[in-house]
Image (cartoon, grey):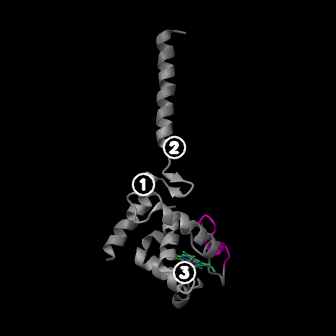
Amino acid sequence: MNVKLLIFILGGILVGNIAGSLVSHSDHTEDGISERVLQSRWYTQEQVKRGRALYKENCAQCHQADASGHANVIEGNSAPALNGTEHTWHHPLSSLRRTVKQGGIPLGGTMPSFSDKLTNEEIDDILAWVQSHWSSDIYTAWEKRNKQSY
Ligand code: HEC
């Protein structure tokens, strides 16, 4: 084989690998998004860590351990996904907090109230963990709505 052709092929493989690793680079770590992305968000990694345990204990039975939702359907009412794939990111932080405190029963739903079970800090920890599943695009779209709501 001609040397120039060989260099051309090897160069192509190298460039392909670099491009591939850039494309497959993910902002997600075991605890959600990476430190780099987190710096622009309202919560800390400590909150995400605390929130993970609290979520598992209080929310996972209905919203699933990975927040993908639709476990434990009660009276035909199924708990939506909280991981950014459904409607949840349309709500500003104030209404997400209110939903967890009041539950869905006052609005004709079935989600229980957590106002007697969780402190405001614990609710924020859980919401931090929930939002750590949101992609940068979803978070940015949420942030815009959140700002407009004040
Ligand atoms: C017993 C089942 C159940 C538990 C436990 C539960 N939820 Fe829900 N959740 C639901 C259901 C069902 C809905 C849909 C509204 C309704 O019926 O009340 C909902 C709705 C929500 C919404 C509104 C989502 C949207 O897209 O509008 C949020 C946010 C939420 N839950 C967060 C939580 C968090 C955080 C916890 C834990 C602290 C939790 N839920 C525990 C069943 C549950």
Q: Secondary structure at mark 1?
A: helix
Against 45, is 5 above or below? above
Q: Secondary structure at mark 3?
A: loop
Which disc is residue 118 wearing? 3
Residue 89: x and y in percent read 45, 69
Respond yes or no on whether mark 3 lies under 8 Å from ligand 1.
yes
Where's the C terminus, which quadrant? bottom left
In the image, which is nearer the foreground, mark 3 or mark 1? Answer: 3
Label located before the other in sequence (3 or 1): 1
Residue 96: x and y in percent read 46, 76
In the rendered structure, which segment of residues is drawn in magenta? Answer: 61-73
Residue sitting at 50 percent across and 76 percent down?
Answer: 123
Q: Is residue 139 visible?
A: yes
Amino acid on which disc 1 is placed:
Val
Q: CA distance from mark 2 to mark 3?
A: 38 Å
Residue sitting at 42 percent across and 62 percent down?
Answer: 139
Residue sitting at 47 percent across and 58 percent down?
Answer: 135
Q: CA distance from mark 1 to mark 2?
A: 16 Å
Amino acid on which disc 2 is placed:
Ser
Which disc is residue 37 wearing? 1
Give 39 or 147, whichever is nearer the viewer. Answer: 39
Q: Magenta span: helix, strand or loop, mainly?
A: loop
Amino acid on which disc 3 is placed:
Leu
In the image, which is nearer the foreground, mark 2 or mark 3? Answer: 3
Label located before the other in sequence (2 or 3): 2
Asked if residue 66 is among those painted magenta in the image, a careful observer would answer yes
Mark 2 lies on residue: 24
Asked if residue 88 is among those painted magenta in the image, a careful observer would answer no
Label 3, residues with CA under 10 Å away: few <14, some 14-19, many ≥20 = some
Residue sitting at 47 percent across and 73 percent down?
Answer: 124
Give 133 or 120, whichever is nearer the viewer. Answer: 120
